Amino acid sequence: MSVEPNENTPSRNRVAGKVVIVSGAGSVGEGWGNGKAAAYVYGKEGARVLCVDFRGDAAEETAALIRDAGGEALAYQADVTDERSVEAMVERCLAEWDGVDILHNNVGGQGTGRSLESITVDDWNATFARNVTSAMLTCRAVAPVMEQGGGGAIVNIASIAGIRHLNVPTAVYSATKGAMIQFTRNIAIEHARKGVRANCVLPGYIDTPFIRRIVDGKPSYTYKGYKTAEEYCSARDAVIPSGRMGTGFDVAYASLFLASDEASHITGIELTVDGGVTATCPGV
């Protein structure tokens, strides 16, 4: 039986001495979200981590966990959909550690525009700002720093929704995740000769606090017709060939590989982390 990675997975110092910025490093609730787990893993693996989140307390929680594990981390509150806020974030990192080796973009969200009749222009624009513009701003600010330092690695978190329909309406979200994939491919090619790699991780169904968050006063799973979180999680587990949802640490360790020197000849790709879901086709 395979062993699921978690917060206790032993370190191999795979990014020792590197400086990492993780946007979306906090969690929306108790437990391990993708960004929180990624920041923690980078820290455990020897990197100095700037934990960035719109919510300062969430960023500080993640940074404290890294420090408690013996790593080096700082919390930074920023809105990565805002150009000036991103510039200040990078300046803070440079002032503290004089470089950026890895940029990990985890900021994102569903939005409310799931089907054509429910899409509003405001929601469309807000979801694109959160899911795509944020990555453009951080990449644009960090890529020149990486080039001056001799290279670096960018990991952008997309989703299997960017390449597959998930049997529920996710029109705006899927559009943004497809855009993230193409954006990443483009910057990978543009900066390849200057030593900057860029890749996407595509999580599938991941068990994080995000799927239990409160939306308009109700748990998010109720919008899909489930009465309890356990019922929703069981339904998700059942459609995955591996038999379980992934965890934030599954996403984090895939990201760690792409960010590490072990992946030095890998750029412009999408690494799917989904337990086999996108390799299947509904039976009839």
Image (cartoon, grey):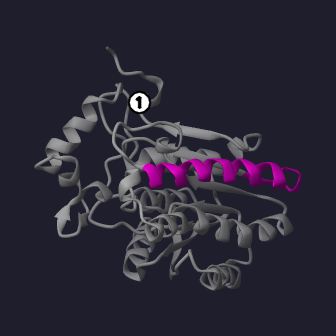
- Residue drawn at point x = 33 percent, y = 30 percent: 240
In the orientation shown, which residue stands out farthest toward the front?
117
| In the image: residue 259, left or right of residue 167 | right
Question: Which amino acid type corresponds to the residue marked 1 in the rendered image?
Answer: Val
| In the image: residue 66, left or right of residue 128 | left
- Residue drawn at point x = 71 percent, y = 47 percent: 185
In front of the other: 172 or 79 = 172
Q: Which residues are magenta?
A: 171-197
Circle count? 1
In front of the other: 200 or 20 = 200
Which quadrant is the N terminus positioned in?
Answer: top left
Q: Was residue 194 drawn as part of the magenta stretch in this picture?
A: yes
In front of the other: 226 or 209 = 226
| In the image: residue 191, left or right of residue 31 | right
- Residue named by callout 1: 277
For disc 1, the neighbor class at 10 Å (few under 14, some 14 to 19, many from 20) is some
Q: Was residue 129 drawn as part of the magenta stretch in this picture?
A: no
| In the image: residue 139, left or right of residue 202 | right
Kindly state the secondary structure of the residue where label 1 is placed.
Answer: helix
In the orientation shown, which residue stands out farthest toward the right?
193
- Residue drawn at point x = 31 percent, y = 14 percent: 284
